[in-house]
Image: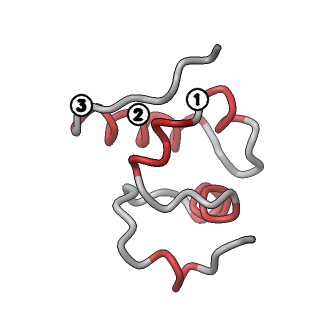
């Protein structure tokens, strides 16, 4: 089930490019905490998720003492 941008109210994701936002929303991610359950490698596989967006997400997670899930 994909979410429309208006369905992402309450999102605490940083400001990302439109393709990256669509990739995350399409995969059901609207909160930073949800990203702690997925690896960075898995996010890279999402169409529209580029290196800049991954850095922005990594930094936003780190600011809250969080990180992506381990690869294994």
Check the image and report above or below for 20 versus 46. Answer: below
- Neighbor class of circle 3 (other Cα within 10 Å; few <14, some 14-19, many 20+) is few
Residue situated in front as seen by the camera: 8 or 54? 8
User: Label 1 belongs to which residue?
Assistant: 40
Check the image and report above or below for 18 versus 53. Answer: below
Q: Secondary structure at mark 2?
A: helix
**Residue drawn at x 76%, y 37% as measured from the top left:** 45
x and y, in percent, of residue 39 in the image: 59, 28
Q: Secondary structure at mark 3?
A: loop
Please tell me whether mark 3 or mark 2 is closer to you in this view: 3
Q: Do tag 2 and tag 1 residues touch (Cβ < 8 Å)?
A: yes
**Residue drawn at x 40%, y 60% as measured from the top left:** 15
Q: Is residue 46 left or right of residue 56?
A: right
What is the distance, in whole Å, between disc 3 and disc 1 at their CAs? 16 Å
x and y, in percent, of residue 37 in the image: 53, 36
Q: Secondary structure at mark 1?
A: helix
Q: Quadrant of the C terminus?
A: top right
């Amino acid at each position: 089930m994909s979410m429309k941008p208006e369905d992402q109210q309450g999102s605490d994701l940083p400001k990302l490019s439109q393709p990256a936002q669509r990739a995350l929303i399409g995969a059901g991610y609207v909160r930073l905490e949800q990203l702690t359950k997925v690896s960075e490698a898995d996010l890279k596989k999402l169409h529209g998720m580029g290196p800049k967006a991954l850095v922005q997400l990594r930094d936003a997670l780190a600011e809250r003492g969080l990180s992506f899930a381990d690869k294994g």
